Image (tube, rainbow, N blue to C red):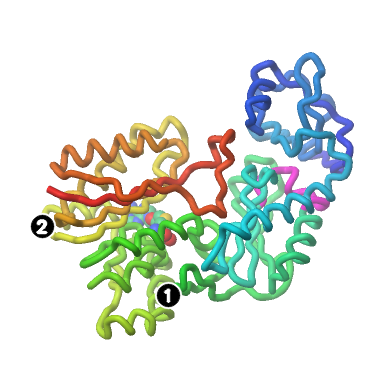
Amino acid sequence: MVRRPLSSVPDITIKVSPRGATRLKDGHVWVYRSDIVSADEATPGSLVAVTDHRGQFLGSALYSSSSQIAVRLISHDVVADLPALLRQRVADAISYRQPFVHDTNAYRVVFSEADFLPGLIVDRYHDILSLQILTQAMDTELVRSTVIAELTERLHPASIVERVDPRVRQLEELPPRASGLLQGEKTSTIFNMNAVQFKFEALAGQKTGAFLDQRENYAAAAQYAHGEALDVFCYQGGFALHVAPGCAQVWGVDSSRPALEVAEQNAALNHPQLKDKDKNKEIEWIEANAFDLLKDYSSSGQRYDTIILDPPAFAKTKRDLDAALRGYKELNLRALKMLRPGGILVTCSCSYHVSFPDFLGMLADAARDARRNLRLVEVRGQAKDHPVLLNVAETAYLKCVIANVSE
Ligand code: SAH
């Protein structure tokens, strides 16, 4: 692959079709390859000027030679100095969060398109930053070094790690690269959200290590959870640990043993806090397939006061939508049948392809089939450090509904 350094002033022009131009004028930031009319000499990851088919300038963008998303807009203006723009974007992302992000030292610092840094994700876990690079442009040395320098200057992390998704690098036709330290030596730490403590191993676990997008939903769920609670798809215990102080007993279910081992360590970390309220309280972790377990438990007449459902994304593409909705319905139907009157259901979906109306429709069907009345207590999305850019629908993906169940 020929790789040219990113030039600052885009001297390469990409012409897009009327459909591509309309998309950009409507406030979206992507142009698909099928809407590219001509791409001059655009090299992988280069900074380009984007024009409509008549040559009218639409903005500056980062180009990918392999992704279906060929163009990701980075500015509506001509970019004279790309490093300066990147530094400004990182600074803006940090200050955007200041009024919104409280009670945590773990949060998403940069959320790709939603922070006008398409292809870059940065998560902070106390004193460790975890970086994900998703595009050719963000993988260039100039971008990497600029972003890392700015993050270091502003946040003073003990270390910075990169988490690599080999599939993404393959799709972007980037050479293989291992996850690892980019700066510093520290790879484990303890972070807290809403006064609950979590262990963090920077080079293990799913995503960049935790599901930070649920942070505000953890606190919301803790307000209503009571009695006997079942946290299904509990991973390292995010919901279970948050609801434990308000519940009589909590069970966490996941199919991943390594996740449950960390959950158990997290519970021990928070133990003094749990013990204050109830000396004998413990969370029980159950390794099981959630579908099988819910089926067994519901047919054997198990009852709960609180059930949390936070499955992995069932719809990875639009084509999976129907199957995904069937999966969500099965889980929710079983949970609803097991909830006592006055019970609380906390039910989530992190599939972008399942919209809020789809999700609420599925839940209404499940309530009807379970012969339960559901009253919506809260309809929630992702935490504010994962901003939703209104004209870029893809930035909104998490749904979290908290409902009260009655007969
Ligand atoms: N609630 C968690 C995040 C859940 S992510 C939190 O707030 O941190 C989804 C989890 O589902 C993962 O931990 C994964 O191991 C688990 N999982 C995936 N398929 C499963 C299945 N069939 N049964 C049980 N757990 C499953």
Residue positioned 30% across, 81% down in the render: 277
Residue 187, picture quadrant: bottom right
Residue furthest to the front: 99
Q: Is residue 22 magenta?
A: no
Q: Secondary structure at mark 1?
A: helix
Q: Is residue 339 left or right of residue 243?
A: left
Q: Quick one: quadrant of the N terminus? A: top right
Q: Amino acid at mark 1?
A: Asn
| Residue range highlighted in magenta | 133-143
Residue furthest to the top: 54
- As measured in the structure, the alpha-carbon distance from the residue carrying label 1 to the one carrying label 2 is 30 Å
Q: Nearer the viewer, residue 243 or 326?
A: 243
Q: Secondary structure at mark 2?
A: loop
Q: Is residue 229 left or right of residue 93?
A: left
Q: Is residue 138 magenta?
A: yes
Q: Nearer the viewer, residue 332 or 69?
A: 332
Disc 2 designates what residue? 301
Residue positioned 41% across, 57% down in the render: 217
Residue 113 pos. (x, y %): 64, 42
Residue positioned 37% across, 51% down in the render: 311
Q: Which mark is residue 266?
A: 1
Residue 87 pos. (x, y %): 79, 53
Q: Amino acid at mark 2?
A: Gly
Residue 349 pos. (x, y %): 39, 46
Residue 7 pos. (x, y %): 88, 41
Asked whether residue 238 appears in the rendered view, the answer is yes
Q: Is residue 338 left or right of residue 22?
A: left
Height in image: 185 above or below 74?
Answer: below
